[in-house]
């Protein structure tokens, strides 16, 4: 598998303190170089949680500034202010069932993306699911999935010669009955389906019979090849699972059991980069809430199952030592209408919030809580703020280190990115573009000038200590010129070694500092 970018965060660092804290002045650079090399070999996994049916975003992430307006337009399902979980420093709150998500947000391990969707929303479950899975425009029919095209761009020879020494593991795993479009490439499907986690394919040792040199023979040979792959991958998956005899306790729910399997496979050494798990029941046309207590009911139960399973998954990863290389994302085919219906539920809508969670999640929120003015009519919907393909493209670039050509082939177009992965202390040598970053004088006594060529203009500069902790943000703002050139006061920092990190849009550069 290709070398990955390595990104560490301050609050949950596993390795940086032990490497950097024990360095002598002489060995600082050499040890950091070795650390970079090891870090870049880290394999990452993205776990996609599909909330089937269309989750009600307005009762999941609630715009606190518009509660009185919500009372007017969705009286049948609106949550009481006293039950909503506050999110400090924001204008929104969380459903009372999401107490774990509230904690993850406070810890900087969960990001809320407001109003994610696509132009010209299709309100059919089947069609909208296909759009989300394929990453297509709503007016085009695509038979491949966005992750399938990504894997195809990375593995153009698949399925011929797979598995092999470099790629012994499944390229994607989905749990449930039947395959989705998500992992379907233009030529082949890339996922291994686990129907029942207690049953694995047996490795097939016997040789295959020859096939005739005809079109029918070619199809037969392909079917046998896929069958053989399934059996070999089954043996690999079973072997990985057997390496993890102990895990944290999970709730005995559909999602809890699926995430337990995923965590076990990752910890068992499976280098599969993509996983899909499912949770159904979100098509809440009626009886969405308990009539006597809107904080209870079917939607509350669903969100509690989601909350509890994700929290168990996060705790299990910490226990098994895989937490810093796993990212999770929830998605649903659409949201629900602003106006509730008379059946105590909500009907098919458009945009909805999306969660990205994990130790490496950027954290915080992007966008604004939906604006509700109280005069909405039944057919009104929440306006889109983020195209879902922006999220996909951002994960490919920032999590998997995908380059522009692969992104173009995957997304069938170019979409702007949003930050979804934590600011990097150290980024891949392959990915870091030269910015001519200079700090002088260096070593520093009191003042020093920071100079570099501007890439996007959205600049942030941080000082990192030798323990990998952010000491201070010394600059944040928009650069007015094509070259940044500014003098900073370093007199307040104790003598020692530091890293100055410049984030210019999605480009990051670092330089070592010595403070006298």
Image: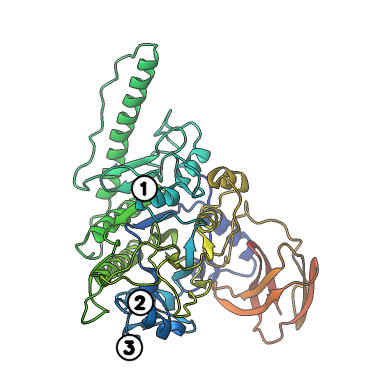
Residue positioned most to the top: 213
Q: In this view of the protein, which residue sits in the foreground, 407 or 274? A: 407
Residue 22: percent from left, percent from top: 53, 70
Residue 235: percent from left, percent from top: 27, 38
Residue 420: percent from left, percent from top: 52, 64
Q: Are marks 3 and 1 in contact (CB under 8 Å)?
A: no
Residue indicated by mark 2: 74
CA–CA distance in space, label 2 to label 1: 46 Å
CA–CA distance in space, label 2 to label 3: 17 Å
Q: Residue at x 42, y 31 (%)?
A: 159
- Of the numbered discs 2 and 1, the one sitting upstream in the chain is 2
- Of the numbered discs 3 and 1, the one sitting upstream in the chain is 3
Q: Residues within 10 Å of mark 3 (few under 14, many from 20)?
A: few
Residue indicated by mark 3: 82
Residue indicated by mark 1: 270
Q: In this view of the protein, which residue sits in the foreground, 257 or 4? A: 257
**Is residue 60 visible to us here?**
no
């Amino acid at each position: 598998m290709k070398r990955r970018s390595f990104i560490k965060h301050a609050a949950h660092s596993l390795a940086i303190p032990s490497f950097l804290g024990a360095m002598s002045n002489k060995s600082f650079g050499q040890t950091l170089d070795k650390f970079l090399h090891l870090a870049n070999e880290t394999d990452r996994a993205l776990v996609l949680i599909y909330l089937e049916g269309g989750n009600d975003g307005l009762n999941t992430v609630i715009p606190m500034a518009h509660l009185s307006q919500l009372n007017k337009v969705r009286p049948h399902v609106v949550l009481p202010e006293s039950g909503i979980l506050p999110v400090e420093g924001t204008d929104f709150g969380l459903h009372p069932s999401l107490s774990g998500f509230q904690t993850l947000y406070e810890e900087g391990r969960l990001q809320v993306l407001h109003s994610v969707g696509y132009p010209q929303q299709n309100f059919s479950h089947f069609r909208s699911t296909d759009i989300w899975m394929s990453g297509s425009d709503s007016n085009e029919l695509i038979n491949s999935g966005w992750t399938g095209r990504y894997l195809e761009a990375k593995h153009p020879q698949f399925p011929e010669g797979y598995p092999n020494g470099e790629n012994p593991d499944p390229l994607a795993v989905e749990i449930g009955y039947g395959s989705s479009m998500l992992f379907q490439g233009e030529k082949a499907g890339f996922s291994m389906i686990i129907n029942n986690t207690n049953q694995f394919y047996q490795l097939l040792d016997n040789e295959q019979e020859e096939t005739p040199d005809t079109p029918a023979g070619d199809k037969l040979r392909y079917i046998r090849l896929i069958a053989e792959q399934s059996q070999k991958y089954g043996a690999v998956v079973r072997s990985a699972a057997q390496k993890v005899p102990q895990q944290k306790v999970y709730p005995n729910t559909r999602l809890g059991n699926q995430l337990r399997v995923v965590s076990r496979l990752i910890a068992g050494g499976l280098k599969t980069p993509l996983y899909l798990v499912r949770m159904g029941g979100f098509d809440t046309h009626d009886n969405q809430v308990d009539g006597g207590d809107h904080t209870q009911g079917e939607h509350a139960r669903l969100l509690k199952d989601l909350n509890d399973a994700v929290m168990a998954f996060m705790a299990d990863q910490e226990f098994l030592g895989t937490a810093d290389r796993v990212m999770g994302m929830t998605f649903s085919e659409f949201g629900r209408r602003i106006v509730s219906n008379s059946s105590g539920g909500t009907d098919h809508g458009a945009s909805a919030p999306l969660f990205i969670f994990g130790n490496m999640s950027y954290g915080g929120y992007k966008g604004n809580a939906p604006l509700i003015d109280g005069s909405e009519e039944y057919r009104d919907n929440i306006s889109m703020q983020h195209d879902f393909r922006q999220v996909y493209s951002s994960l490919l670039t920032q999590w998997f280190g995908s380059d522009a050509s692969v992104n173009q082939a995957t997304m069938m177009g170019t979409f702007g990115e949003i930050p979804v992965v934590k600011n990097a202390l150290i980024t891949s040598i392959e990915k870091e573009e030269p910015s001519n970053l200079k700090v002088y004088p260096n070593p520093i006594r009191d003042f020093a000038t920071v100079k570099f060529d501007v890439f996007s203009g959205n600049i942030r500069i941080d000082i990192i200590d030798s323990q990998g902790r952010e000491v201070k943000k010394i600059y944040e703002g928009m650069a007015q010129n094509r070259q940044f050139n500014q003098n900073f006061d370093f007199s307040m920092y104790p003598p020692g070694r530091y890293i100055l990190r410049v984030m210019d849009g999605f480009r990051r550069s670092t330089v070592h500092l010595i403070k006298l």
